[in-house]
Image (cartoon, rainbow, N blue to C red):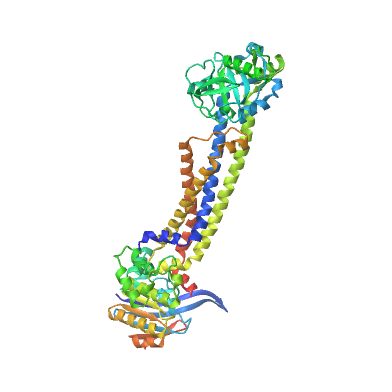
Amino acid sequence: MKRRSLPVKNLIRRPGRTFALILLTVFLSLSVLGGTVIVSSLRQGLNSLEARLGADIIVLPSSAQSKVSFEKLFLQGTAGAFYMDASVLDEVLQTPGVEAAAPQTFLASLKADCCSVKIQVIGIDPDKDFTVRPWIAESYAREIGPMEVVVGCKVEAEVGEIIRIYDERCKAVARLAPTGTGLDTAVYCSMETMGVLLQAAEAKGISHKITSDDDSRISAVYVKVREGADIDQVSSRLNSHIRKVTAVRTRSMITQVSDSLAGITRTIGVLIAAVWALTVIILLIVFAMMTAERRREFAVLRLIGMSRRALSGLLLTESTLCSAAGALIGAAFAFTLVLPFTALIEQSLGLPYLTPDWKTVLGYAAATVLITVLIGSISSAYAAWKLSRTDPGTALREGT
Amino acid sequence: MALRADNISKQYFRKTGEANFFSAVSHVSLTLDPGTLTVLTGRSGSGKTTLLHMLSGLLPPSEGKVLLDGADLYAMSDADLSRLRNTGLSVIPQARSALETLTVLENVLLPGALYRRKDQRAEALHWLEKLGIGHLQDARPAALSGGELRRMAIARALTQDGEILLADEPTGDLDDENTALVLSTLRAAADAGKAVLLVTHEQDAKDYADCVYRMNEGEMQACI
């Protein structure tokens, strides 16, 4: 019999009480870590979206239902195809306040070899592009050659693998880093390759409102505004001077996402705070009740020579052990429930969602475990203090 | 080691009629010398247990002092008093005093474990055997009868081996045979040099005592 084994024996041999205490802290740890990972992933997704858009204004054909389709493409990866004449690019470049403009052409694939769902193929002009190339350069330093594609991280194709899009063989030359946006399911190629794919689609009878010899169509123009120019003014000019297009400030798109994110973050924050408050109150009540129930036991320990300090230490050790066990189990549950279902959460929230790297997630887990243990210990501290003030003689008499 | 109560009293707050306080023990003086067995009798509610708790350092008196070899128990720090309760004073409480999460043997060994004393397993098993519950060493208290629990508490106090032994109705749940066994064991402890105080209703206890006090409504009558 060793003194330090006493709290462990007390916990193991009172399984019901111990289970209840652990369950409470599991709930606390699970909600805190799960909520933190979700909020952090949403924030990181927004940052990534901001970084990947890389333009001040995006010009789209009015027929593209304006930014609605575009947001779907960015946020949910919904494949889409909308086109405007390539001459729009020159008109944009001639608009006062525009520093640079880069065209992109979108093509929604049929079910490609690589993918179980339709993917978005995006053609870029390497000479003009300033939005996607820096990002691609992180994974692929060379130019994208003919019939070469760079795939988003969620496209199921290995580097070097041949994927077939409209029966055209394209070689995956690089895989992009995750963004947490719809762009993760996109495939990038040069405008030259895009022309081939558009013709192949036409040959398959897929109408994209283009003719087979028409390679002068683009889907979007990304605009960088000259330093010092008013972005709203430039946007208005583009809308008024160029026919059948809509110029959208990327900031307004991000602001909407940011607003949604703030709402979700607030809701999750309130829920976490409510769980915390509720758990602390319940723990305080549980420890108070437990201490009252164990008054005689504690009086006996005092009777045989346990000091007030040692008795408080015993109670704190028991609560710390329970809290630590609950915190670890809760963190494990959070990993099991939140991380494997990233795609589902992303889909149901409809917002950019980028899980932080494992070091950050482990950091969150460590902080959650620490906070949960602290809460468990602090909740029992009052009971321990009150207990240390109890007169053992009176407690012994009460049960006679 | 001698334990002395010097004119101690204990009052509890209790609103009865015009009085606000109830006097459980009133101006009691008593000395427990080594090698003696002192018996304390009296009707229920006469203040015996309150006196024993004050003597054992568990309940501070409202007035007076409890002195162990001249040192005031209640002037000691909690740490010192706790250590004294572990090493110098052994108490057999009246009420159920087993820790339910420990086995009988673990309960008996617990006082020694608190201050990392030498392994007392042999002594513990000796006292459990002597008191007739050696076969229950691995049982949990919930499986024991009242009499067995009482003997477990006695074995714990004897294993603790304090020079002062304070027993509060240790024969309360016992049959005649076990009562005689416990009384003779306490007598042997006194003969071995311990100062023993036995609070009891047991008439036969007088036969084992060096001195018998009787308490009545908080006051103590002289040694018979």
Where is residue A190 shown, x and y percent of the image?
56, 16
| A270 horizontally vs B205: left or right | right
Frontmost residue, A378 versus A66: A66
Observer-nearest residue: B191 or A23? A23
A53, above or below A364, in the image: above
Count every numbered label the image shows and give the total: 0
Image position, residue B216 (x, y; %): 45, 85
Picture quadrant where residue B156 is located: bottom left
Left or right position of B98 against A73 = left
Eyeballing the image, is B165 above or below A265?
below
- Indicate whether A245 appears above or below A283: above
Q: Position of residue B65 (x, y in %)?
A: 38, 74
Give the camera-side residue of A146 and B172: A146
Rendering coords of residue A107 (x, y %): 63, 21
Residue at 44%, 60% in the rendered image:
A12
Q: Is residue A238 left or right of residue A355?
A: right
Q: Is residue B163 visible?
A: yes
Which image quarter holds the N terminus of chain A? bottom left
Q: Is residue A393 visible?
A: no
Image quadrant in which you'd find residue A194: top right
The front one of A198 and A65 is: A198
**Residue at the spot 39% in from the left edge and 70% down from the top edge:** B104
- Decide: is B1 above or below B202: above
